[in-house]
Amino acid sequence: MIARETGHRRSESNALGNLGIVARYQGDYARAIGYAEQALALNRAIGYRQGIGRALSSLGETARMMGDYARAQAYYTQDLAIERELGQPRSESIALSNLGLVMLSQQDYARALDYYTQALAIARQLGDQDRLGYTLTGLGQAHAGLGQFADAVSALQQAIAIRRQIGQMPLLMESLAALARVHLRQGDVTAAWQVMQEVCAFVQTQSLAGANYPLQIWLTCYQVLAANHESRAGEMLQKAFDELRTRAVRLADPTLRRAFLENTPWHREILQAWADNTQRSFEQALDEVMCVAE
């Protein structure tokens, strides 16, 4: 590594961090953790607080994607304290949103709402459209989880408008899917389908890389299609299941793999829906993925 050879320690830590991000999005979580831990140790050795926060956030992101929410929360909380100490409002907003994601994943909607409300206030002060898209999407999902559907629809429609305007297509699909789930919760399958037509078309030809929870988008496609008795529902469910299995296979440790499958609500929903569709039990569906991975 050139940065290491020339003794530029901050550049080396940045390079390690970037390698970790690439590994994470490739689903190689072990390597992602390894790179982030190296970056964290290096940043601590040179006293680079901003780099420490960035490495902690990266470790939190990997833990979240693995379904290890307790560890993700611990890393994100440490990052939040550093960003506040350094007076970095945008990074503080990101850390708050990350904590909101952890709460959403654990269906703790009241705490998610609190984190996203704080993050949204900062994003508005900054006039940061990117952060507004993230925080409004999270806020909408928190409101929906609490049964506050009018507030959920308002927040998600704002997020959709922002993400469409700035061209964040995978993230736009995430916001649209969240809105469709609100319509499903309200029993309006027609409105849900009107929203999801764009999403279902997108996932057939485009990548969802960059979305926080691509598997949840696939699941929502299936749920809306099934609710509208569309023939493609089974195909969408199989794609969601296949993608879940592909990601699970990358986790070599059976304990981590099981946690990845069981700890995230929509992963469990995919397994249960696939089990129902193939006349299996949930445990048989789970074993199907665990055995393939082994």
Image (cartoon, helix red, strand yellow):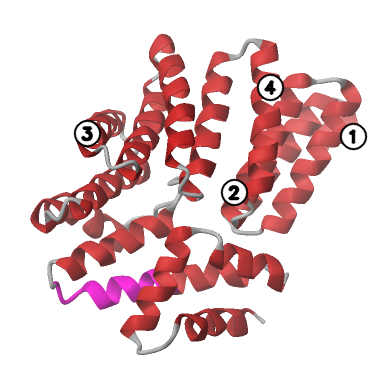
Q: Nearer the viewer, mark 2 or mark 1?
A: 2
Q: Quadrant of the C terminus?
A: bottom right
User: Between disc 2 and disc 1, whose residue precedes?
Assistant: 1
* Mark 2 crowdedness (10 Å alpha carbons): few <14, some 14-19, many ≥20: many
Task: Please name the residue that numbered disc 3 is placed on.
Answer: 157
User: Between disc 4 and disc 1, whose residue precedes?
Assistant: 1
- Please give the name of the residue rendered at 24% of the width and 47% of the height, measured from the top-left corner: 182
The foreground one among 168 and 245 is: 245
Give the magenta-colored segment's residue range: 230-241
Amino acid on which the number 3 mark rests in the picture: Gln
Q: Mark 1 and mark 3 in contact? Answer it, CB < 8 Å.
A: no
Amino acid on which the number 2 mark rests in the picture: Arg
Task: Please name the residue that numbered disc 2 is placed on.
Answer: 64
Task: Please name the residue that numbered disc 4 is placed on.
Answer: 81
Amino acid on which the number 4 mark rests in the picture: Ala
Give how far across and how far down residue 15 sits, in percent: 73, 36
Q: CA distance from mark 1 to mark 3?
A: 50 Å
- Please identify the residue farthest to the left as the structure is shown: 190
* Mark 1 crowdedness (10 Å alpha carbons): few <14, some 14-19, many ≥20: few
Q: CA distance from mark 2 to mark 3?
A: 26 Å
User: Between disc 3 and disc 4, whose residue precedes?
Assistant: 4
Q: Which mark is residue 5?
A: 1
User: Between disc 1 and disc 3, whose residue precedes?
Assistant: 1
* Mark 4 crowdedness (10 Å alpha carbons): few <14, some 14-19, many ≥20: some
